[in-house]
Image: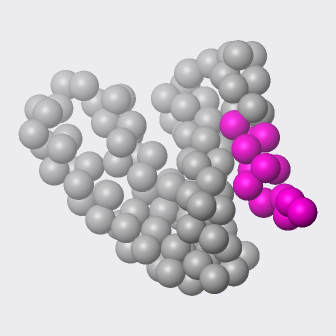
Amino acid sequence: MTTVVLLLISNTFMTFAWYGHLKYKEIALWKVVLASWSIAFLEYCFMVPANRLGHGQFSATQLKIMQEIITLVVFGVFAVFYLKEELKWNYIVSFVLIIGAVYFAFKEWQ
């Protein structure tokens, strides 16, 4: 559970670093890049421990897939509530199909 919480925090910082500036297009690009790098540093402060603690309980591939699903969930919430974008039906279907990858990555095949 610690790994998931750390990944949630990390991805929240990552989403703001990558997409938060879209609401502030009047700010010079170089300033946005510096701000994004600063936020991304915080992302790494949570992502690296999440992967370090999670590896062993999960494979590296499982950690990556888990991180991607968390990224999609965090981004979906961010896009709707922060950027005020519509969550269209085809986006939801796309997310569900990607979430299907979790089943295949975590299922023990014999």
The quarter of the picture where residue 90 lies is top right
Q: Residue furthest front?
A: 110
Q: Residue at x 78, y 60 (%)?
A: 106
> For residue 39, which quarter of the picture?
bottom left
What is the span of residues highlighted in magenta in the rendered image? Answer: 98-110
In-image side of 61 versus 34 (left or right): right
- Which secondary structure dominates the residues rendered in magenta? helix
Residue 72 among those drawn in magenta: no
Q: Position of residue 71 (x, y in %)?
A: 56, 48
State the residue at coordinates (11%, 32%). Answer: 28
Up/down of 31 relative to 56, above or below: above
At x 61%, y 41%, the residue is 72
| Residue 34 seen in this snapshot | yes
Residue 85, position in %: x, y? Answer: 56, 21
In the rendered image, residue 104 lying in the magenta stretch gets the answer yes
Q: Where is the C terminus found, in terms of image quarters? A: bottom right
Which percent across, then down, holds residue 32? 20, 41
Q: Is residue 33 shown above or below 83?
A: below
Which of 73 and 94 lies nearest the eye of the viewer? 94
